[in-house]
Image (cartoon, rainbow, N blue to C red):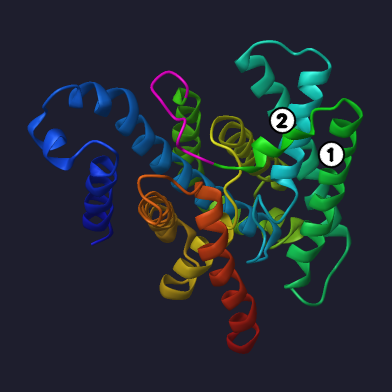
Amino acid sequence: MVFIVLFALSVISLLIGHVPVSYILNMEGNAQVLLVVGRIPRLISILITGMSMSVAGLIMQCLTNNKFVAPTTAGTIDGARLGILISMLIGVSGFIARTFFTFIFTLLTTGLFVMIINRVKLKNTTLVPLVGIVYGGILASITFHIAFEFNIVQGVNTWLMGSFATVLRGNYELLYVSLPLLVLSYVFADKFLIAGFGKDFSKSLGLSYNTVMNLGLVIVSLISSTILITVGLIPFIGVIIPNMISLMMGDNLKKTLPIVAISGAIFLLICDIIGRLIIHPFEVPISVTVSIIGGTIFLFLLIRRPKHA
């Protein structure tokens, strides 16, 4: 069923735009060029981003054993943004080199958050994302202070606005890095789940706790940094999709991970279609529609889960 929904939404996404649908269906004029250069790359970017961010959120929730942790509520995205800024200031040239630098910086800031959560035992699980938001706010304040000193605040603001409007053939291929990471996440799904129960429990089952934790952090950091550099900030999706699937299907990670990935792509497609239709022929950035819809769902999950724990 989810594959049918995904296929139907993908077709709708390809047909939405300034060019009439009849031109696209009949391949009239430059319709073929429009599809190959613009709309198909955009669709692929949406699918990969939705799947990757959802799985990244699921991995972080397993590693921290908390349902409300995700790249956008754990300072991961804020760390990536600070990494981009520092790479620009120190003169890191080249798209790949800057991406690698951002990845390393994201890995360090995400690892620091996990260390904080492991050392500070919070009785209420809903406090964990609040700690993450505060932590992300500190990183964001550092970023904007540095940007203000070097008069590049406007440039930093553009990284906050996630959008697929500028995705064309030739500038989205970095997202393909996420595909092998998704496969790797599925292979190590059970190990991520076990690692979330703690170091002693993992060792009692013969699992190398540090290795699994580091692998999970590498996957999350690499996904977050590539998406932020290529597309921009996409909030909430890493929190709400894993939680919604968990409520319906339970916490068997091996079973739910593919559904989480597909559901993330479906959710992002829906938000993108709404953003392209609501003020057509203009477009609302994807980060705005995701923030409104995802934020509402996130508040519902925060209120609901303590009552049905």
Which residue is tagged 2?
155
Q: Does the image show residue 21?
A: yes
Q: In this view, does 198 lie above or below 99?
A: below
- Mark 1 is surrounded, within 10 Å at the Cα level, by few (under 14), some (14 to 19) or many (20 or more) other residues, namely many
Residue 198 at x, y percent in the picture: 73, 60
Tell me which corner region of the image, top left, top right, bottom left or bottom right, holds residue 11: top left
Instruction: Give the SS element for disc 2.
Output: helix
Q: Which amino acid does label 2 sit on?
A: Gly
Determine which of the numbered discs, if any, sits on residue 174 in the image.
none
The C terminus, quarter of image = bottom right
Q: Which of 156 and 53 is in front in this view?
A: 156
Q: Which residue is drawn at 66% across and 52% down?
A: 72
Q: Which residue is disc 1 drawn over? A: 144
Quick one: label 2 or label 1, which is nearer the N terminus? 1
Q: Tell me the magenta residue range.
A: 163-171
Front-most of residues 105 and 154: 154
Does the magenta-highlighted stretch encompass residue 164? Answer: yes
Q: Which of the 4 image quadrants contains residue 131? A: bottom right
Q: Does the magenta stretch include residue 138?
A: no
Q: Is the magenta stretch mostly helix, strand or loop?
A: loop
- Relative to 27, say whether 266 is above or below: below
User: Residue 124 in the image: x percent, y percent?
Assistant: 78, 77
Local packing at callout 2 (Cα closer than 10 Å; few below 14, some 14-19, many 20+) is few
Residue lying at 74% horizontally and 43% vertically, measured from the top left: 78
**Rendered residue at 73%/73% (across/down):** 126
Q: How far apart are marks 2 and 1 (CA)?
A: 10 Å
